[in-house]
Image (cartoon, grey):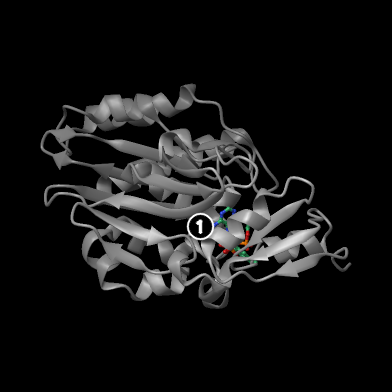
């Protein structure tokens, strides 16, 4: 099948893009790497009237070190993040997750903003942003907003973005020296979307403080396992009983099955991955 007819604009500035997207008479969509959107259009799961191509807007691409945070422009491609010294130095959790995203050809085009806006429940970047306590900076014709990741991902392919609003950048706080990170996922083949995954950050290990445990690929969105976080906080990283309580707390959460596995299997996989992640910490 091929996409329905659509119009195409390639603005050179953010203001121009936002003005095109603000026209409520037209069903307009931003085009980033196209790695999900073009497939959705060719399957006619999406039939926008107008594509607003963000690839000509230089201000949306690239990373900067802002002191306490690394700010990544929405149009920054996964491949650039993989090569970035700022990522390898300050964002080891991002670096650990990147090789799990699809394959090099897709990472050459796919963007962090596209992944965040799409909010696929099995995608790595939303989980990583939640685990790092990131902020999503959005822009629309009415101005900018900063939305914490905890309030951005609302459901299956559903985010806090409103009509005409785009992801402009993501802002990730630089972790302190005592912080630790772990990222584990299971996929049928390397590069496939995750059947189950976990991203974990802690501010300190002995005792653990500031644990953020995010599960993905097991529900309608990436979500924090707050019971597991509470079970670990205040205990040493080697405390086996605390780990058992954290793993046990996942039994009480609602998991969704999909074509890959039942809800029960997903719960079991999440428990195994949490053990592995805490072991890795
Ligand atoms: C074979 C294959 C395997 C894949 N495996 C994985 C995987 O394992 N993990 C994973 O995370 N992803 C995977 N992907 C998806 C890939 O990571 C995409 O790049 C990503 O989902 C979307 O990014 P994009 O830049 O291509 O966005 P696009 O496809 O251009 O856009 C996706 C959606 O987001 C909207 N959008 C794009 N940018 C913005 C913005 N700045 N603001 C607001 N809305 C915007 C678009 O309108 C569209 O609705 C896979 C893709 C393929 C084809």
For residue 39, above or below residue 231: below
Percent position of residue 32, x then y? 59, 65
Name which residue lies at 26% across and 47% down. 279
Picture quadrant where residue 19 is located: bottom right
Q: Does dot 1 land on a helix, a strand or a loop?
A: helix
Q: Quadrant of the N terminus?
A: bottom right
- Residue 61 lies left or right of residue 94; in this view the side is right
Residue situated in front as seen by the camera: 82 or 182: 82
> At 59% from the left edge and 62% from the top edge, which residue is drawn?
16
**Does 41 appear above or below 24?**
below
Disc 1 C-beta below 8 A from ligand 1: yes
Q: Is residue 146 left or right of residue 280?
A: right
Say whether residue 281 is visible: no
Residue drawn at 50 percent across, 25 percent down: 253
Residue appearing at x 10%, y 37% in the figure: 206
Residue neighbourhood size for the residue with mark 1, other residues' Cα within 10 Å, grouped as few (<14), some (14–19), many (≥20): many
Vertical placement of residue 236 versus 136, above or below: above
Specify the farthest residue to the top. Answer: 252
Instruction: Kindly identify which residue carries mark 1.
Output: 113
Q: Position of residue 163 (x, y in %)?
A: 65, 42
């Amino acid at each position: 099948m091929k996409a329905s007819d659509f119009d195409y604009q390639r603005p050179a500035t953010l203001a121009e893009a936002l003005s095109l997207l603000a026209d409520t008479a037209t069903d307009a969509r931003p085009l980033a790497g196209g790695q999900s959107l073009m497939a959705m259009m060719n399957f006619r799961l999406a039939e926008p009237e107008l594509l607003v191509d963000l690839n000509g807007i230089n201000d949306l691409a690239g990373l900067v070190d802002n002191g306490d945070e690394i700010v990544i422009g929405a149009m920054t491609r996964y491949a650039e993040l993989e090569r970035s010294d700022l990522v390898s130095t300050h964002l080891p959790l991002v670096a650990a997750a990147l090789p799990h995203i699809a394959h090099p050809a897709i990472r050459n085009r796919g963007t962090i903003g596209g992944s965040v806006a799409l909010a696929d429940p099995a995608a790595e970047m939303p989980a990583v942003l939640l685990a790092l306590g990131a902020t999503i900076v959005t822009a629309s014709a009415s101005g900018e907003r900063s939305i914490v990741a905890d309030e951005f991902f609302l459901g299956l392919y559903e985010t806090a973005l409103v009509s005409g609003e785009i992801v402009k950048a993501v802002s990730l706080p630089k972790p302190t020296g005592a912080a630790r990170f772990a990222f584990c996922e299971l996929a049928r083949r390397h590069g496939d979307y995750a059947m189950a995954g976990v991203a974990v950050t802690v501010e300190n290990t002995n005792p653990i403080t500031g644990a953020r445990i995010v599960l993905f690929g097991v529900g309608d969105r990436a979500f924090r396992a707050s019971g597991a976080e509470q079970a670990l906080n205040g205990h040493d990283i080697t405390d086996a009983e605390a780990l058992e309580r954290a793993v046990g707390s996942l039994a009480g959460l609602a998991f969704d099955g999909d074509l890959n596995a039942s809800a029960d299997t997903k719960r079991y996989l999440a428990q195994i991955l949490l053990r592995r992640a805490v072991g890795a910490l």
